[in-house]
Amino acid sequence: MSIKVLVVEDDREIRGLLRTALAAEGFEVLTAVSVSEATALLEHDPPDLVVLDLGLPDGDGAQLVRAVRSKSAMPIIVASARHQEAEKISLLDEGADDYLAKPFGVSELLARIRVALRHRGTTLQPATTRYERGDLLIDVDAYRVERAGRPLHLTPTEFKLAARLVRAGGRVVTHRQLLADVWGAEHVLDTHYLRLYMGQLRAKLEAVPSEPRHLLTETGVGYRLIVD
Amino acid sequence: MKSWGEADRSWPGRAALVGVALLAAATAACAVLDGAISLMSQAMIYLLAVVAASYLLPRLAAVGSAIGAVAALNFFFVPPRYTLAVEHREHLIALAAMLAVALLVSYLSAALKRESAAARESESRAGQLRTLAIELAAAGSEDEAVDIGRRALLQRFAGPVLLVTSIDGAISSGVDAGEDVMRALRCCIDEAALLGPGTGRWPGLDAWYVPLGTRDRVVGAARIEPALASDTIGREHAQAVAALVAQGVWRLRLLEASLAARAEVERQHVQATFLASVSHDLRTPLAAIVAAASSLEAQRTRLGDEEQGRMLAGIVAEARYLTAVTENTLQLVRLSAGGGALRTEWQSIEEIVGSVVGRLRSRPSGGRIRARLGRALPLVRGDATLLAQLAANLVDNALKYSDGAVGLTVGHCGGRLLLSVKDRGPGLAPGDESRVFEPFYRGRDVSDARGAGLGLALCRAIAAAHGGSLVVSRRVRGGCRFTLALPVVEQPAVEVAA
């Protein structure tokens, strides 16, 4: 059975293009033009993944995200234009899995869908605890980090930070989520903690810290580990 | 200023004392000279005392002195002495004439005194109004004008004095005068009418309410205490002051309106230039996209794979360019609309540069970027998205106008964080160092390249919004260098847990 993707998008042209592009990749595509239509579809014909456009005519994407999250771990990818930055971040904090900045290319969308499905696919997979790409290895269970075969020493906080990103499996983790999970809820506004510890982490994990190849900064949103 | 009447009221016994003293002096003089001079001359000495009393004392005391003088002359010097009886008919006539003269003199000098006092007061009021008019002409704001008016009223009235130019403004600025006062002020403004004692309207009020201005344009109202129904002159003065203040406020409002109108014309002019330039920047890539897409639509079967690929790549590149122009335009508009959208947090410049370079590397020209960052760079306060856009615009610009390497360096020097982007392109014409930052300005030799117009203007706006600066300089062996300087503030504290 093919994987079912629900595209919630009010612009007819983009909806049509996404349908064609996703169908060409072998997905079964459902479309909805509004939050209410999407809610009805989710009820009767639940998909495996949702691509949610922000700024729908009948309002609030956050409501949809909360409704989905209350029932399932179905991946949600938010597509947003630049002026919807704040809304996008709040949806990610609410539990959306990832985002795409408009305008996006089809290849970017497919890459995000692949990451989302790998992490929470149609079958229940164990949480990701291992990151291996290029010369970098992070094994959360074994508490081991290696670069080019040589073990690296991370402080406990650095390790917690790295582990949180590894568990996200290539999806973006917002500043707020990282701060809450690593330092605790009372530190969710202390973004300077992130700047400092991410800098230390890059210095240890990256060959050229100013041009990271693993630890990607999503400007204004958060961080992610690049997966192939 | 206080009038004569008020000074006398302040000590009522003084007038009687002065009157008695004058009569005593006249009696003493007459007694000393008694026998040496005639009764007629003694009468003249008393008359002198009456004239002096009329000049120095209020009306009632002066009349009392006149009667006292006649009585004293009669008692002490007219035979039979030490009685009030009169022996000769001649003396009786003389005393009656003297009384008439004394009363007439006291009446005339009282009238003279009143008139000269009125003249003095009206001169002083005219002087006050003149000063007020001059001060109001120099007032720079409505608040200042109101303050000048309040001080002018307090020169004449003991107060308290309240002056408002709008009821809502008065309430919002914390004037708490009670509901009744506010209602009276509102009525005074709405009806453009003088209210209070002696005005025939709302005589029961304990203050005067004077509208600022006449029926067509009342700009506010004044509440004045003390308000006596009989103080007609005071009321007139208050109205004159109110008229001058109204004129001053009206002048300031007209001035403000004309300045606003001029600013609006200016703004519309800038907007028109802006729109013309943006639509130029948008039209060119759109033309390229339409040409390529329509060619693919109509001629697909006749085009080779390679040509089709080139056209498709062109469409994607032009569309990306359109996105960048749109983003720059929107950000510039947002920043120039007041900068309220700035989300400042602690930012790592290494991180921002890293993400920008990472993005630009994926382009064909991205291999020419040579980034070099100093170690242990401080954090800066800023909006990450805007700073990233600034860095991307600078690097993008350098890649577009040069073929060689583009250097990107970040360092920390003298309390500032410095980010420089260098190229070996054609450089700047002399005099272009500041003009490149004007919206839509393009260097002379680069008319075929496009889109620099807005990017640099936005870069400078972003730098300014962060309290920093962005300058460009020509390099000795060709090319140019853009340098962004951001202030480094005290670094945030981090709890050292681990």
Image (cartoon, coloured by chain):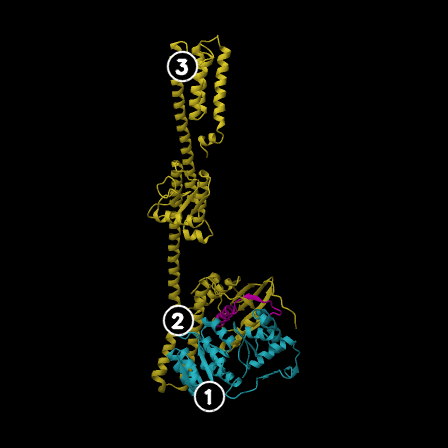
Q: Which residue is mark 2?
A: B282
Q: Which residue is mark 3?
A: B95
Chain of the residue under the numbered disc 1 shown in the image: A
Q: Is residue B440 magenta?
A: no
Mark 3, residues whose alpha carbon is within 10 Å: few (<14), some, or many (≥20)? many
Q: Residue furthest left?
A: B216
Mark 1, residues whose alpha carbon is within 10 Å: few (<14), some, or many (≥20)? some
Q: Chain A is which colour?
A: cyan
Q: Quadrant of the rendered structure where residue B281 is? A: bottom left
* Tally of marks: 3
Percent x, y for residue A182?
Answer: 60, 75
- Residue drawn at (43%, 46%) of the image: B163
Q: CA distance from mark 2 to mark 3?
A: 113 Å
Percent x, y for residue B414?
Answer: 60, 61
Q: Nearer the viewer, mark 2 or mark 3?
A: 3
Q: Nearer the viewer, mark 1 or mark 3?
A: 3
Q: Amino acid at mark 3?
A: Leu
Q: Is residue B392 magenta?
A: yes
Chain of the residue under the numbered disc 2 shown in the image: B
Task: Please report the bounds of the magenta region as a residue range.
Answer: B373-399
Task: Please name whichever residue, B195 or B396, is drawn nearer the observer in this view of the structure.
Answer: B195
Q: Are marks 2 and 3 on the same chain?
A: yes
Q: Is residue B54 visible?
A: no
Q: Are marks 1 and 2 in contact (CB under 8 Å)?
A: no
